[in-house]
């Protein structure tokens, strides 16, 4: 221990980083692009907001290089709400992450939704005081991100499509992978670590605990209360909603409905009640028609 | 299942680290169950309000109709313990909250939300807690509140020893109600939960 005195407070520990994610469990984190949207999200009961310049649906539509948001824009959102504010950095762009930490965001999403800045390396997240959430399509990817210091994992469902099929696949793969690990003996775990391309100690920890050592959320394509509830029933501990709220007909009402459906994910009567009269959902994209090069989940390794 | 489970303790399960509190309570030898609805409240002897986002809990407590029943049970003497957001939910006055933010109004105190700062300021530090025997408690503070003022009936159990928040009140008790600004449920140290279970047993 290197504390100057034994009563001195210590910041940036793995426990406070992972603990922050524990506190948003059972909640909904909403993408917002303006302070007004952030207020609507907070009014609706969001546990946090993700500040970004364009929601994934617009990033898809407009193309070009997508980067960290303007610090002024993030400041505006921090000033508008009292709930935690998250923001996105490009995969591997450790300076964007340094800037976001300096601004005072509460969590950084090293996100495939932005254009990757490094083709081989993710950010060394242990080097930061601010915690990171990272996307994963399967258990090996989740464990590699945790090994790099991610304090929270989310599925990498195809953002900006309003289609949950990919998030479903990722949730099933991550949860199924964990269940499989817990059936293996100590010797078999070495081979499993090799197959997963993840550190043996982490594989062993997951096999013993039957869960990831960090909180697992879902993200990508959630557009309805039923989508959110399905992800929770598949084992997500909370929900990120991107374009699904502010690309719909009545964002305030839909946001509140998704919050309730997340808490009462195992109660079809509540989900039915909150699903009424929400107006139009976002139109969405059939992922089978998306060319490989436009699939964001393929970014990161 | 333990047959010594004489007490049923609920954990308010609208949002937050519900599982960690359920596990800590079970480890203390009581029956622990989640509470989301007024009917589920009827089945518990005591209630824990977990860590989480207090504005979200407030909104869901109103929307689900569980706010008033919890308020009246607390007024009638039901033991309650709140950690972090749970401390905010037990306060009679919330500072830096939303204008429409509701609480269970159990402990006469003014609690300031996110008083220690943003997530980069979240910290771990030892806290000496009156009524908790042994070493100082290793306390985990996450975007934590502090208690700014307390009423005459409130007993201050612990303050921060060192650093920018030195001297701030972070653990209190009023009658059967207990609150901490930190998260014992994240540490595996059961002493605060044991203290609460003692309070709840004595109240039966």
Image (cartoon, coloured by chain):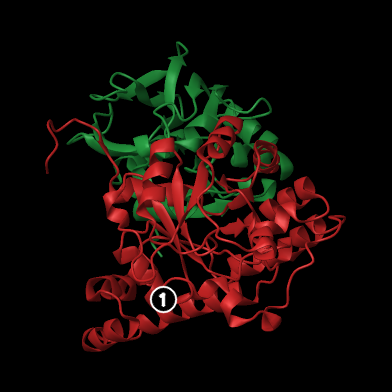
Chain colours: A red, B green
Give the percent coordinates (x, y) of residue B105: 58, 25
Give the percent coordinates (x, y) of residue A137: 49, 75
Residue under the point 40% across and 84% down: A180
Give the percent coordinates (x, y) of residue B3: 40, 60
Residue under the point 48% across and 32% down: B87
Number of other residues with Cα within 10 Å of mark 1, as a class: few under 14, some 14 to 19, many 20 or more = many
Query: In the picture, which quadrant includes the N terminus of chain B?
Result: bottom left
* Count of marks, rendered view: 1
Q: Is residue A9 left or right of residue A261?
A: left
**Is residue A66 shown above or below B169?**
below
Inspect this view and state whether residue B66 appears. no
Query: What residue does disc 1 label?
Result: A139
Residue under the point 34% across and 59% down: A123
Residue under the point 17% across and 36% down: B135
**Is residue B106 shown above or below B16?**
above
| Residue furthest front in the image | A64
Nearer to the camera, B20 or A293: A293
Inspect this view and state whether residue A121 appears. yes
Nearer to the camera, A120 or B195: A120
Nearer to the camera, B111 or A227: A227
Q: Secondary structure at mark 1?
A: helix
**Is residue B193 shown above or below B153?**
below
């Amino acid at each position: 221990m290197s504390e100057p005195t034994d009563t001195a407070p210590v910041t940036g520990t793995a426990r406070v980083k992972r603990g922050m994610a524990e506190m948003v469990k059972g909640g909904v984190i909403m993408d917002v692009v303006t302070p007004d949207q952030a207020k609507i999200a907070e009014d609706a009961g969001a546990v946090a907001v993700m500040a970004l310049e364009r929601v994934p649906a617009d990033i898809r539509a407009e193309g070009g290089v997508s980067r960290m948001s303007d610090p002024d824009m993030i400041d505006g959102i921090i000033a508008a709400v009292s709930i935690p504010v998250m923001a996105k950095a490009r995969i591997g762009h450790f300076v964007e992450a340094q800037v976001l930490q300096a601004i005072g965001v509460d969590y950084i999403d090293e996100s495939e939704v932005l254009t990757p800045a490094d083709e081989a390396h993710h950010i060394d997240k242990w080097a930061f005081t601010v915690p990171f959430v990272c996307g994963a399509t399967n258990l090996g990817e989740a464990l590699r991100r945790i090994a790099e210091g991610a304090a929270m994992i989310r599925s990498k469902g195809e953002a900006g499509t309003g289609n949950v099929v990919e998030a479903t696949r990722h949730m099933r793969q991550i949860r199924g992978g964990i269940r499989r690990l817990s059936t293996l003996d100590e010797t078999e775990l070495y081979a499993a670590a090799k197959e997963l391309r993840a550190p043996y100690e982490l594989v062993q920890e997951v096999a013993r605990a039957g869960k990831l050592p960090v909180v697992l959320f879902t993200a990508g394509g959630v557009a309805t209360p039923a989508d959110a509830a399905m992800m929770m029933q598949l084992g997500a501990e909370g929900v990120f909603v991107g374009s699904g709220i502010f690309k719909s007909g009545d964002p305030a009402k839909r946001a509140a409905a998704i919050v309730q459906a997340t808490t009462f994910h195992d109660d079809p009567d509540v989900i039915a009640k909150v699903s009424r009269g929400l107006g139009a959902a976002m139109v969405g994209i059939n992922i089978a028609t998306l060319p490989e090069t436009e699939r964001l989940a393929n970014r990161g390794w | 299942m333990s047959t010594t489970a004489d007490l049923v303790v609920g954990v308010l399960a609208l949002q937050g680290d519900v599982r960690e509190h359920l596990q800590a309570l079970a480890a203390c030898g009581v029956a622990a169950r989640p509470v989301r609805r007024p009917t589920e409240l009827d089945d518990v002897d005591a209630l824990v309000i977990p860590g989480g986002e207090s504005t979200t809990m407030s909104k869901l407590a109103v929307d689900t109709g569980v706010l008033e029943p919890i308020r009246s049970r607390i007024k009638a003497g039901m033991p309650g313990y709140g950690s972090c957001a749970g401390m905010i939910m037990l306060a009679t006055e919330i500072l830096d909250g939303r204008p429409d933010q509701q609480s269970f109004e159990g402990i006469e105190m003014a609690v300031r939300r996110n008083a220690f700062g943003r997530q980069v300021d979240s910290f771990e530090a030892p806290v000496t807690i009156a009524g908790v025997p042994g070493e100082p408690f290793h306390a985990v503070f996450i975007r934590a509140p502090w208690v700014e003022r307390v009423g005459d009936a409130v007993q201050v159990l612990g303050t921060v020893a060192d650093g920018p928040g030195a001297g701030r009140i972070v653990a209190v008790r009023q009658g059967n109600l207990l609150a901490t600004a930190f998260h014992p449920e994240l540490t595996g140290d059961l002493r605060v939960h044991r203290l609460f279970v003692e309070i709840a047993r004595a109240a039966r």
